[in-house]
């Protein structure tokens, strides 16, 4: 049976009960290996928000790795005035928009990889018909979200799929809370009401980033940051 890591899962050997702030403090003090906890914790979020902007699976994965390395090398700039998760998400958002402007990513790549990962997960609970329906429903939802204009898609992903608050979403995207509310309302209207009602409760299962893909990002980032150490610069943002 294949092993999959959900949004908050981490290897048993790691003290995953630590808060983000505790992990950051210990990484700064030299326990670099603990950085894996943060990657396991936020892989799914970063993949979803990056992909909502570039709509390209491989590019979204590369953005994640860039964001993790940049965050690691800039930990001295994190002073804790904002949540670490928000700070990290903003790094990924900025990089995604930078690449969109530079490369003009607009092509929607098939989500076959995510669906394949989901099909490989063996569960003793749902029967084959239920598993097939779940995969098909998620695929329909993913396609509907992909069809949203970018400014609405990113808000929808953060608010409805990642369950961030209005204020957190506004901070991550550098827009006002009022704009978040307006864009979310318009995004909901753009999605057919019957589709939204049918699969809204299951939205958290869309755009899964797990299994070997999750492990690959963690492995690549750990390899990259093994060559550097967080700056000890006392200045903080």
Image: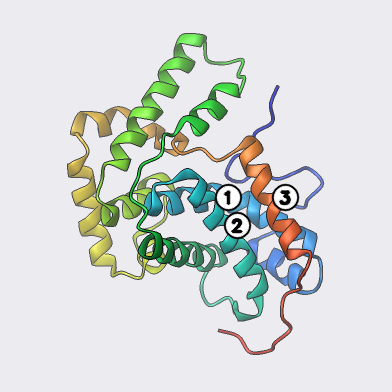
Question: Few, some or many C-alpha atoms within 10 Å of disc 1 (few <14, some 14-19, many ≥20)?
Answer: many
Q: CA distance from mark 3 to mark 2?
A: 10 Å
Are circles 3 and 1 on residues that touch, CB within 8 Å?
no
Measured as percent of width and height from the top left, residue 141 is found at: 34, 33
Residue bearing mark 2: 65
* Viewer-closest of 100 and 155: 100
**Residue 6 in view here:** yes
Q: In the rendered view, would you say 207 is above or below 187?
A: above
- Extreme-bottom residue of the structure: 235
Residue bearing mark 1: 43
Q: Secondary structure at mark 1?
A: helix
Q: Nearer the viewer, mark 1 or mark 2?
A: 2
Residue bearing mark 3: 219
Q: CA distance from mark 3 to mark 1?
A: 12 Å
**Residue name at image x 32 percent, y 34 percent:** 143
Question: Few, some or many C-alpha atoms within 10 Å of disc 2 (few <14, some 14-19, many ≥20)?
Answer: many
* Viewer-closest of 137 and 200: 137
Measured as percent of width and height from the top left, residue 49 is found at: 43, 53
Question: Few, some or many C-alpha atoms within 10 Å of disc 3 (few <14, some 14-19, many ≥20)?
Answer: few
Q: CA distance from mark 1 to mark 2?
A: 9 Å
- Quadrant of the image containing the C terminus: bottom right
**Residue 158 in view here:** no
* Viewer-closest of 152 and 167: 152
Q: In the rendered view, would you say 52 is above or below 146?
A: below
Q: Secondary structure at mark 2?
A: helix
Measured as percent of width and height from the top left, residue 164 is found at: 42, 55
Q: Secondary structure at mark 3?
A: helix
Dividing the picture into quadrants, the one containing residue 122 is top right
């Amino acid at each position: 049976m294949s092993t999959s890591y959900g949004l908050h899962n981490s290897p048993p050997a790691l003290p995953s009960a630590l808060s983000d702030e505790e992990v950051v403090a210990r990484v700064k003090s030299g326990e670099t290996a603990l950085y894996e906890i943060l990657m396991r914790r936020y892989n799914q979020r970063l993949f979803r928000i990056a992909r909502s902007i570039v709509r390209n699976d491989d590019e979204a994965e590369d953005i994640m790795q860039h964001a993790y390395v940049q965050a690691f090398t800039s930990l001295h700039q994190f002073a804790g005035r904002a949540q670490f998760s928000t700070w990290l998400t903003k790094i990924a958002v900025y990089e995604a928009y930078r690449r969109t402007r530079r490369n003009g990513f607009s092509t929607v790549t098939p989500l076959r990889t995510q669906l394949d990962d989901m099909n490989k997960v063996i569960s003793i609970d749902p029967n084959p018909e239920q598993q097939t329906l779940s995969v098909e429903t998620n695929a329909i939802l993913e396609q509907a979200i992909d069809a949203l204009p970018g400014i609405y898609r990113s808000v929808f992903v953060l608010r409805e799929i990642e369950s961030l608050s209005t204020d957190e979403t506004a901070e991550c995207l550098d827009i006002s809370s009022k704009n978040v509310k307006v864009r979310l309302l318009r995004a909901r209207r753009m999605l057919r009401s019957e589709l939204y009602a049918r699969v809204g409760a299951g939205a958290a299962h869309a755009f899964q980033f797990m299994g070997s893909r999750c492990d690959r990002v963690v492995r690549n980032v750990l390899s990259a940051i093994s060559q550097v150490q967080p700056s000890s610069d006392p200045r903080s943002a």
